[in-house]
Image (spheres, rainbow, N blue to C red):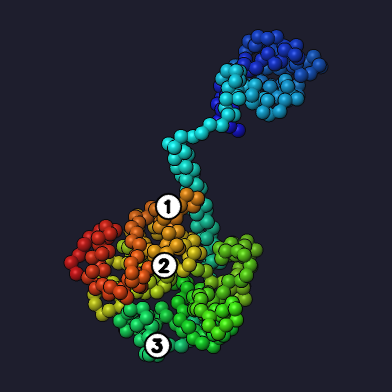
Amino acid sequence: MSDVVSEALERVTLADVWDLAAAFGFGRSVPTRDGVLESPFREDGKKPGFSISKDLRLWKDFGTGEGGNSWTFVEKCRPEWSKAEVAKCIVDRVMGAGAWEASREKRTLTAAEKREWRLQKQRKEREEMVARRKKREADLRRLGAALLMDCPDCVRSRWQEASEPGEERLAKLAKKRGWPFDWAGFAAEAGWLRFPVDQFGEQGRGKRFVAFPVEVVLKDVSRHFFGYHQQFFVPPKDGGDEGRKGWTFFPHRPKVVRTVYQRALLAAADGEGIREGDQWCPPVPFVLGNPWKADLWILTEGQWDALTFWGALGLFDEIPDLPFSVAIFGIRGVQGVSAFMDHYARGLKNRGVFMVGDSDEAGKSWYGIRQKNPSFRERLEIYGAKVEVRILKGPWGKDFNDYYRAKSPSREEMIQAVYDLGLVNEEVTV
């Protein structure tokens, strides 16, 4: 129902449309509020049969039980009319002849009106998005153990028993990333790196590629292990000798087109839980540190950038802790954004969040202003986070790992850069 019809219905009374009842034998003047009438819509002659409210807005036929407002009165008097004709009658009688046609005419909006219309639409979409997110979070909390299921023992043992890398391989990995040698060794010793056998690529099967754990940190600091995110060999499409390395989750997700959260909800609704043979591995972010106790969250586009940032702050070195607490997230791909919001959105309120952006197209979807759906940054701000963004771009590359490899900033420079963001309350001399 249009705005003009809604406004007309708020103003119209039976007095405005009473003449339509003349064809049924009613007089042209509205009866007094205390008048008792015979119903014009029946011929049984029962009295009293018809009454009108004191404000002349409602009517009631006691013989049939029918009643309503001016709209239903016009429909009763002119049953052959369409809804558009009923609306035209009411609008023209309340607002003047021609008001209905005028309201139907399209006009070109001014630039200011278009801008206001877009802003209102975006606000409405964001409010709806927040409502959906809150409902989704409530569903996830209700699921509890059904969602946060550990992996089967065979998957856990495969991760834990994955080959520890030799010194030569660690040195090669550290050189490629621009790390000091001991960073890679410490990461492997801490369980943040493993080298399981490739389970997926045909030509690469039997080789060992790097992998990262997939786990969620809960508020009690416990970690629920789902599986691991592993490199694997992707053969070329044309059947050539050279392929490329890709990433996949293990246990990998089935081919059914459903998100991991939809699958969890369906499993809980069925009352069966998630069977061990039907396990999945959600794209939750790689996390270093305890996010629930941290003063600052740092979000990077990937696991390697997260490890490099951790080391750049000196957290791999044998030195005192930082003067502020930090948790670093490595977001895993496009679906990793939704997984991050599902598991960690409730910790965003008044939290300082530093987004370390890549300068590629994927980075634009994180930090840009989008008209249809909020960007990742806007979603964080909707939940009350204080967000600062730095997009890394230069001749040296497009992400933090490239920047660190080229610039090798000192620990002191990194800490001062974090303070300069204004997200950490108290500055301490280091």
| Mark closest to the chain's N terminus, 3 or 2 | 3
Q: Is residue 116 above or below residue 20?
A: below
Q: In the rendered structure, find residue 369 and report the number of the disc placed on it.
A: 1
Quadrant location of the C terminus? Answer: bottom left
Hey, what amino acid is under mark 2? Glu
Residue 190, x across and y down, in percent: 38, 80
Q: Nearer the viewer, residue 359 or 420?
A: 359
Relative horizontal placement of residue 329, taking residue 42 as reference (left or right): left
Q: Residues within 10 Å of mark 2 (few under 14, many from 20)?
A: many
Identify the residue shown where x is 22% and y is 70%: 412
Which numbered tag is attached to residue 301? Answer: 2
Where, by quadrant of the figure, is residue 34 drawn? top right
Q: Which residue occupies 62% across, 65% down? A: 257
Is there any visible trace of residue 205 in the rendered image?
yes
Inspect this view and state whether residue 293 appears.
Answer: no
Foreground residue, 149 or 382? Answer: 382
